[in-house]
Amino acid sequence: MAVREYKGPGGRYRVYFKFQGTQHSRIVQTRAEGKEWEVEEKKRLAQHAEKTRTLTYSVASKSYLEDCATCMQPGTVQEKFAHYKAFAAYLEKDVHTADVTIETARKFIRAVQAAKGNKTANRHLRNLKALWNWHKREGRLADNPWDKVKPLPEEEAIKHVPTQEDVLAILMAASPWEKDYLHMLLKTAARPGEIRRLRWDEINLERRVILLWTRKRKGGQKTYRAVPMNDTLHEILVRRWKARGHDTHVFINPTTGQPWSKHNHPIKFMMDRLCVRAGVAPCDLYSLRHYVAQRLADSGKVSLVDEQRLLGHQRATTTDNYLKSLSPDLARLGAALEDDPAQVENESMHEQYAQEVKK
């Protein structure tokens, strides 16, 4: 133990010691207090190190996934499980989490990059980083090797937004229940899963209000937003309420009698079938949300805050970036370029030439 005099607040001495290559220090009043702290702190650190050594990757991933299942959507948990399973296969054997080095982490991400591309590699990196960080917060790990791995560059994907003619053609090609489902998406700007999970106790036909729930929040917190029910939605919901064969959900799978899952064939491939039948460019259910968002923005009839509330974003900046990714507003920029010097010069030359011709 090293001791130095200390003139700051809290004590008279600063004591130091190293444990497994890391230096620890504390301000104390007396040397004896410092010695006592060193003994207790080394004992605590040794116990923590031993606990860390017994935390195998299989145990670490299993306990984290169990925690995720309590607050995240099943699809999110399934993605994490697939990524953790891929890393387990890469390791070929169960190892202690403390033995996973930065070099191991980098080599795995490079292997995923070579096999499946940058975007998939970054998703693996994000989920593995989250696993280690969770155990750090729980006090089981001291370091996270995935923090040292830099995310790979990704090409920005262009979001496909169907045209109004495409949407009308898709609706014409849809069966009655599909048309109801599509109208619910188009009149609420909801995420497909929010309509799949929509319950009758979240609908107020008298007040014409629909409550849409989501877990797309940090930590998986479940929150809701209220959206208005226009005449089209009111007619659909009244009709489905009168003919309902299920006490809880608005849309059910007639084969199972349970709410639809995104993996059920009629839902999973609905838009593929309808786009082919309608003869339009391929698009998915989520692109209808993009279509509504763009239509509202182009109309000029709603504010950014109103659109933020409808889309269910926590911040207006998210909505602003979302809209720009769909269709950047280039009208003002185009108008400004109309007055560029080259055009002014060109117009001046035409005017001068016209005057010379008159002479």
Image (cartoon, helix red, strand yellow):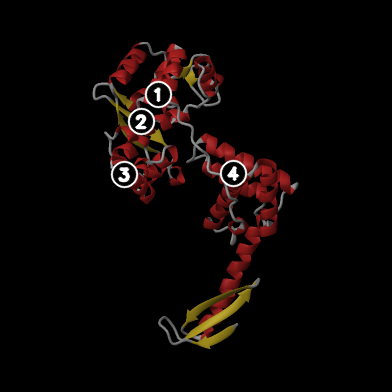
The amino acid marked with disc number 1 is Gln
Which is in the foreground here, disc 1 or disc 4? 1
| View extreme (front): residue | 359
Decide if residue 1 is in sight here. yes
How many marks on residues? 4
| View extreme (right): residue | 92
Asked if marks 2 and 1 touch (Cβ < 8 Å), the reply is yes
| Quadrant of the image occupied by residue 106 | bottom right
Judging depth in this view, the residue of 275 and 256 nearest the camera is 275
Pointer 3 residue: 356
Pointer 2 residue: 295
Q: Position of residue 236 (x, y in %)?
A: 34, 16
- Whichever of labels 4 and 2 marks the residue nearer the N terminus, that label is 4
Q: In which quadrant is the N terminus drawn?
A: bottom right
Residue 164, numbered label: 1
Pointer 4 residue: 119
| Quadrant of the image occupied by residue 319 | top left
Q: CA distance from mark 4 to mark 2?
A: 29 Å
The amino acid marked with disc number 2 is Arg
Residue 24 against residue 209 in the figure, above or below: below
Q: Position of residue 129 (x, y in %)?
A: 58, 52
